[in-house]
Image (spheres, coloured by chain):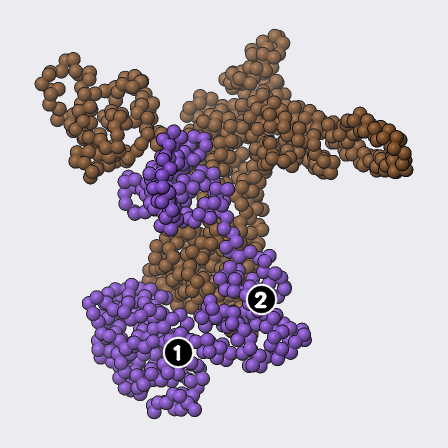
Chain colours: A purple, B brown
Amino acid sequence: MPNLEHPAYPAATLLQLESLVPCRESQVSMLLSIFGERQQFSFPSIFIYGHTSSGKTYVMQTLLKTLQLPHIFVNCVEHFTSRLLLEEILIQLQSCSSETAQNSHMSCDTLNDFVRLFKQAVESRELQDQTLYIVLDRAEQLREMEANILPAFLRLQELTDRNVTVVLLSEIVWELFRPNIGCFEPFTLYFPDYSIGHLQKILSQNHPPEYSADFYAAYINILLGVFYMVCRDLKELQHLAALNFSKYCEPVVRGEANERDTRKLWKNIEPHLKKAMQTVYLREISSTQWERLQHDDGEPGQLKGLSAHTHVELPYYSKFLLIAAYLASYNPVRTDKRFFLKHHGKIRKTNFMKKHEKTSNHLLGPKPFPLDRLLAILYSIVDNRVAPTANIFSQITSLVTLQLLSMVGHNDQLDGPRYKCIVSLDFIRAIAR
Amino acid sequence: GCFVFKPSPKKRRVTQKAAIDFRERNNDSEDAELRFVTCQSLWNQIKLEKEQIQEDLNKQLFDNLEGFLRRSHSERQEKTTKWTCQMKSSEIPTAALVLGVNVTDHDLTFKSLSEVLQNNITPYIALLEAKDCPGIKNLMQKLMGQLMNCYIDVDSLEDEDYVQVSQNRIRCSMTSLINWYESVTKKPDSETPSKKRTSSSRHWQSPPVVVIFKDMESFTTKVLQDFIVICSQHIRELPLVLIFGIATSPMIIHSLLPHSVSSLLCIELFQSLSCKEHLSTIIDKLLLTAQFPFKLGGKVLQVLINIFLYHDFSVQNFIKGYQLCIVEHFYSQPLSVLCCQLVDAKKRVNSLSHDQCENIRRLPSFRRYVERQVSEKQIALLTADSCLKETTQKLLEDLHVYHENYISVLRCLHVFTSSLPKYPLGKQIRELHCACLEDQVWETEEYESSLQLARMLSKSDLVTMLQQCVEIFVSSSGKEFDKTVEKLKEFLTQFQKLEAEAFQEQDVSVSSQKELQKKTDLYHLQKTLLELKESRRSKKLTKFEMLRFEVVDYIDSLVRNYLVPADHKTLHEIVYFNTASVLREHLNAAPRIALHTALNNPYCYLKNQALKSDGGNISNKAPDICIVYRLHLECGRLINLADWLEAFSTVVMAVEGPNADAASSEQVDDIIHARFIRAVSELELLGFIKPSKQKTDHVARLTWGGC
C-alpha cells in the first residue's frame, strides 16, 4: 500500500520514489504537498535541516529526479563566493531544459544582475508553467557571503516574479541563520536522525548479489551492534559494512559454516569489528591498508596507526625552549623566583601555598607569557650559557609555525610579543626525557 | 619563517661577481684566479656527490610513494562494477608524509619528489604552501594556475587559446578544473597521438592529479576542510591524490580535521629518513673520504655539527655552512692553490711565485718543521726556493698519505668504540672524528676508559670486529696496510686455534671433575680441591686474555701511529680550514649582542680614536643614541624622562662645562633637548623602550640585564 499519495503524479512513480527513500516517507509526502502540482506556485523558500547523513541531500535529489521536476542543485561549499554561486546557478539553468544557444560565458557579479539574467533565462526556456526548484546544499555557507545573498534567495520568487522555489539544506537550525535585520521566514522542515531500526532497514537494502538478503541483514545486525554506540552516520556505516563483509563471509567461503550459522559467524566477526572500530573508523589506518591486512590475514598490530607516531624529534635548544614555554605557560609568575633562582629566600611552607596549588593549573589551560620571561627561564634551565643568537629567535618562530607555540595577539613586533604553549603535558614529558 | 639561513654576503659575492673579488684583498693576483677556479670545481664536485647521496637516501621513500600513487587510482578504475566498490564511500587517497622538523630541507625534498613523480607518474602536480592560501579562493586559484600551467608546459604548441585565457578569467571552480582534466586526458587518443606518445607511454591513460600541501601545520583548518569536502564531491570525475607534508607528527591531521572531514580521506603514512641519519651519511661520504682535498678542522666541524644539533636539524644548512667554509678557505688562504688533487698540487708547487714561497715559510707548521731539521737544511729551506718546493712536494705527499690512512684507522677504531657500553668516545663516527682532530686522542681519559672496556670484550665480539677491520683495511686505498691486514688475520687465526684448544681444555677439566667424583676419600678430596684452587690462581691470564690484550695493544699502536691530529702535520694549513670564529660569526649571529656592543661601545664599529676611552664613564663624543642607551641601562623598569634628559645634558655638556656660561647650564638648551628626543625615539624604534601608561612622563624598558 503506497504511503505517498498525490493527485498530480502517477502512482507508479510515487511507488518507485517510495522504494528509493526508505524511512523518509512522511517528510517526502510533506514536501510533495507543499510543492503542489507542477504549475502551481509553491512556498517561496523551504529550509530543511537535520544531522549529518540524515538523507537531506539524497531525498531532495531523488525526489526531484524521479518526479522529473526542473531543478538546480548547487553545493555552497564548492561555490564559495557569491559570484561563483550565482554563475553556477545560471549555467545549470541554461543546460537545464534545452541544449540550444550555449552562451559561452556570462559574468554575474551582483544579485541585481542575477535577477535580470535569471528572468531572461527562465523566459527563454519556457519554464514558466512549471515550478523551478533551486536547491542550495550546505546553506550555512551563505551566511559568510555578502549580507544580501541569503535574504534575496529567501524571496527569490518575489524578486524575480517567476515560479521558483528555493530549498536550503543545512545541518544547523534556522535560528542561527536569521539575519539581524530580519528576513522572509522560510518554511522549515526537520529531518530527524535515523533510528537503529531505520539504519538496519536501509543498510540491508543493498545486499551483494552473491548472498541472500537475510544473510546480509544478519551481518548488518552484528555491525550495528558494535558500531551503533559510536557512529550513526549512515555513509560511514555503509562504508564499514562494505569493508568488513569479506571477512564475515570467510567461514562460508571456506565451507566451515553455512549461511545460517549465525553464532559461528558472529564469533568470527565480532573481534574483527572491534578492531576496526579502533583503527579504520578513527582513520588511524586507511581503508585500503585495512583491506590489504584482511586479505593477507595479518594482525593489525603490525601496522601502526597515525597516533602511534607521536614522538617529535627536536633540536636541542628547541626542546629547551618548548619546555621553558611550557613552564612559563603553566607556572604562575610569582613562583618563577622560587623555581629558577639559585639563591632564593626560603619559602614558608604554609597551607596557603598548598591550597593554591591544588587547583591544578592544567585545568585552567595555558597562559600567555612575554618573550623575555621565556628566555629568562630558558637561560636558567639550560646548563651551559646560551648566547641569544639569531638562531634561538628563529627557533621560536619555527615552533610557532609548527603549532607547538602560538602567538597571542598580533600587535607590533616591537611591543614585546606574547606566546602560549599549546602542547600537552605528555608531549613535554616525552621531550624532556 | 622557520630556521632561517642567511646567506653570507661573501658567498653571494663569489657566485655573482667573478674571481675579481678574490683578488681584492690579496696582492698575488695570478693565484687568485686559479684559486677561484679550483674552489669552483671542487664545489661542483662536492655538489654532484651530495646530490647523488641524497638521491640514494630518498629513493626508498619515493619508491613507496610512487607505489602508493599507482595503487590509489588504478584499483578504482578497474573494478567499479564490483559490489564493494559501489558501497564503499570513495575516499580521497592521501599520503601523510612525515618529514621531521627541519623545515628548510623540505623544499628540496618536495622538489625532487615532484621531479620523480613528473617523470614516472603524472604531469599534473600542484605544490601548495600555506602562506599562499589564506582562503579557499586563493587555494583554488593557486591550484588551477599550477595545474593548467603544467599542462601548457607539456606541449605548448597547441592550445594557444588556452594560454590566452588568463588565470583570473578562468572560473576557479572545481567544474572548470574537471572540464580541463577531461579535455587534457582525452586529447592523446583523438588528436596528436604521435606527439603525445612519449608522455602517455610513461603516464597511463588518466594520470592522477597530485596536490601537495608543503606545510600542513600552517594551513588553516577552514581552508583544508573546505578543500577536502569539495574534492570528495568530485573524486569520481577527477582522480585526486593529496600529499600532506608534515613536520611534527601525523597526529596533526586529527587535530586539524574533524572526524567528518578526515573520514573522507584514505590516509597512508610515509616516513622520511631522519635528519640525523641523513647528516651521518653526508659526513661519512663527504668529509670522511680522501676524495676531496679540502678538509674541515676540528673546531669548525664542531661548530657546524653544533648548529645542526642545537638549532635547526637542517642538513641543507650544514651543507651551506660547509660551502661557506670552502669559499672562505680559498678566499682567505693564499696557499689554498695547493688544495687540489695531489698530481695537480705537485705541478702547481713548481710554478709557485717567490711571494707564495714566503707564505709557505711563514706557516707555523712549516716553521716547526724547519726547526726540527739540521742547520744546513734549515738554511736551504729558508733561502732557496727550489729546495723549498721540493720539500713541499714531499710534505704534500705525506699529508695525502696521512689522510688515506687516517680515515681507515678512524673507521677501524670506530668499529671498536661504537660497541662499547656507554660509548665513552661517542656513538657516531663524527664524534670520534672530532675528538681525533681536536687533540691527541690517546691522551684523553675517554680513550683510556674505552681501551679498558675493550679489554673486557667477549671473544665473539672481538672476532667480528676484527673481521670488520680487515674489511675496512682491504677496501681502503692506503698502501701501508698490507702488514696490518696480515697481522689482523693472524689474530683471527689465533682466535680460531684458541677455540680448538678450548675444547680440549674443557675435556681436561671435565676429566679432573670426574676424578674428583671418583675419589670419595675426604682427605684426597680436600687435597685435590686445594690443588685446583691453586692452579686457578696461578693461571691468572688465559691464552684468550693474553691474545685480547695483544689485539687491543695493536689497535692502540695503530691509533698512535695514524690518528695524529691534523694540526700536528706540516702544511696542514693548506688543506684544513680552521677559523671557527669566522664561521660562527656568519652562521650563528647574535643580533642582541651586536646591538648592545654597538650602543655600549661605539668604538668597536666606528673605529674613531676619540671614542676609545673605555671603562665606566660615558664619552660625550659618542653618538647621542649611545649616550642615551648607556644612561638607560642604569635605570629600572620605568624611566623618568625628565631625569633622563637631565643626565643626558650633563654628559653632553661635560666638556663644554669649563668654558660654558652658568646661565646656559641652568636651562637645557633647545638643541640638546631636540637631540635627546631624537635619540629616545630611535631607541624606541629599536625596541628598547616603549611609552608607558602607568606613569606620566615615564617610559618602560623592554630589555633587562644588559650590563
Give the left or right position of residue B361, taking residue B668 as reference.
Answer: right
Q: Amino acid at mark 1?
A: Val
| Residue at horizontal 66 percent and vertical 33 percent from the top | B416
User: CB under 8 Å between callouts 1 and 2?
Assistant: no
Q: Is residue B561 visible?
A: yes
Q: Residue A119 at x, y = what percent?
A: 25, 77
Q: Residue furthest top?
A: B375
Query: Residue at label 1?
Result: A59
Give the chain letter at badge 1.
Answer: A
Position of the C terminus of chain B, as image quadrant, is top left
| Residue at horizontal 29 percent and vertical 87 percent from the top | A39
Position of the N terminus of chain B, as image quadrant, is top left
Query: Residue at label 2?
Result: A271
| Residue at horizontal 36 percent and vertical 74 percent from the top | A73
Q: Is residue B26 above or below residue B59?
A: above
Q: Residue furthest left?
A: B663
Mark 1 Cα-neighbour bin, 10 Å: few <14, some 14–19, many ≥20? some
Q: Residue A408 at x, y = what percent?
A: 32, 47
Q: Amino acid at mark 2?
A: Pro
**Within the image, what quadrant is residue A108 found in?**
bottom left
**Within the image, what quadrant is residue B166 found in?**
bottom left
Q: Is residue B149 visible?
A: no
Q: Is residue B635 above or below residue A29?
A: above
Q: Residue B121 at x, y = what percent?
A: 53, 59
Choose between B189 and B3: the one closer to the eye. B3
Q: Give the SS element for disc 2.
A: helix
Q: Considering only order in the chain, which callout, 2 or 1, is on the residue closer to the N terminus? A: 1
